[in-house]
Amino acid sequence: MRLERMGPLLCLLSAVCFGALGIFGKLAFEAGVSPGALLLVRFGLAAMLLGTVLLIRRAAGTAPPGIKTTARVLAVALGLGAVGYAGQATLYFEALHRMDASLLSLVFYSYPLLVTVAAVVLGRDRLTAGKAGALLAASAGVLLVLLGAGGVRIDPAGVILAFGSAITYTAYILISDRVVRRVPPMLLTTLVLTGAAVALAIRAGVAGGVGLGFGVDGWLWLTCIVVVSTVLPILAFFAGLRRTGPSAAAILSTAEPVVTTALATLLLPEKLTITQLTGGLLVLSSVVILQMGASRIARPSESLSSARFAK
């Protein structure tokens, strides 16, 4: 198989791994892991693993050409992790602690539309007929997801946290768009993860620490979160992105909530109603519409793909 043909498979592998994050998170919670411990271990170990990969590539001479960076740019990258990434992930896992992984995935995936709307408002993009249609489809989809619960109980606080996570991720993407072209992607990812880990460690210290006395099952699911749903999908996405380009990579990434929903149905006692599934399909279709037009007006989709590591 030619290397170029591996691009879509690598992007799909990344989406599958990221899609399993909510499932591993639920299983970790059941094993006694707190959201604070999960976040601290995830970011700390992932930062160390990616830093090791960077050092190995540099020693082997396979690292990509560096981009000139300043202390200010590096500080901004660390700040993105300490504020944006840590804040988004905290809201995400606090929401996951309160609601089903499948429902959270569909609510959170409203962020591509939020990025587009914010980009139009800020003058970074223009509103086209296709984007307007995508906005209407996504809005209707989110409404169906929330109103189509049937007999399934929806935690209002969990929904608010999920939307808060999507909004925070939107701000993170728009800010990182100004940084990603000045720092090599792998280095930027490592800096963001490091910033998040440091911020969470400080917060844990102020709060009196986090409990790490859970059993082997908890450490197993944490390992899966760090390796399978953080480091591996980051590496796979960047490798796929180089071969497919940002628009195709972003479209392929829409498989993520589908994977989450399928795994939740198979492995967890979760079940979405037909109305919610229809709403989810509308949300995903809107993302595809947005990304298909990205080759003509590419700014938001490029920032979405470049910042994709920050799930």
Image: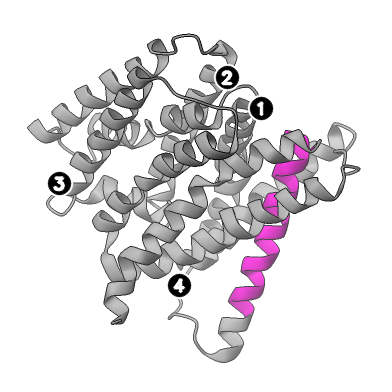
Circle 1 residue: 97
Could you say whether the residue bearing mark 3 is in a helix, strand or loop?
Answer: loop
At label 3, counting other C-alpha atoms closer than 10 Å, the crowd grade (few under 14, some 14-19, many 20 or more) is some
Circle 3 residue: 293
Asked if the stretch drawn in magenta spans residue 92, the answer is no
Circle 4 residue: 68
Question: Which comes before the other along the chain, label 1 or label 3?
Answer: 1
Front residue of this view, candidates 106 and 202:
106
State the CA–CA distance, disc 4 to disc 2: 42 Å
Asked if the stretch drawn in magenta spans residue 41, the answer is yes
**Residue drawn where x is 69% and y is 39% of the image:** 27
Residue 3 percent location from the top left of the image: 32, 80
In the image, what residue type sits under mark 2? Answer: Gly
CB under 8 Å between discs 4 and 3? no
In the image, what residue type sits under mark 4? Answer: Lys
At label 4, counting other C-alpha atoms closer than 10 Å, the crowd grade (few under 14, some 14-19, many 20 or more) is few
CB under 8 Å between discs 1 and 2? yes
Residue 188 percent location from the top left of the image: 52, 61
Could you say whether the residue bearing mark 2 is in a helix, strand or loop?
Answer: helix
Front residue of this view, candidates 270 and 213:
270
Question: Which comes before the other along the chain, label 4 or label 2?
Answer: 4
Question: Which comes before the other along the chain, label 3 or label 2?
Answer: 2
State the CA–CA distance, disc 1 to disc 2: 8 Å
State the CA–CA distance, disc 1 to disc 3: 36 Å
> Which span of residues is magenta-colored?
33-55
User: Is residue 103 something that shows in the picture?
Assistant: yes
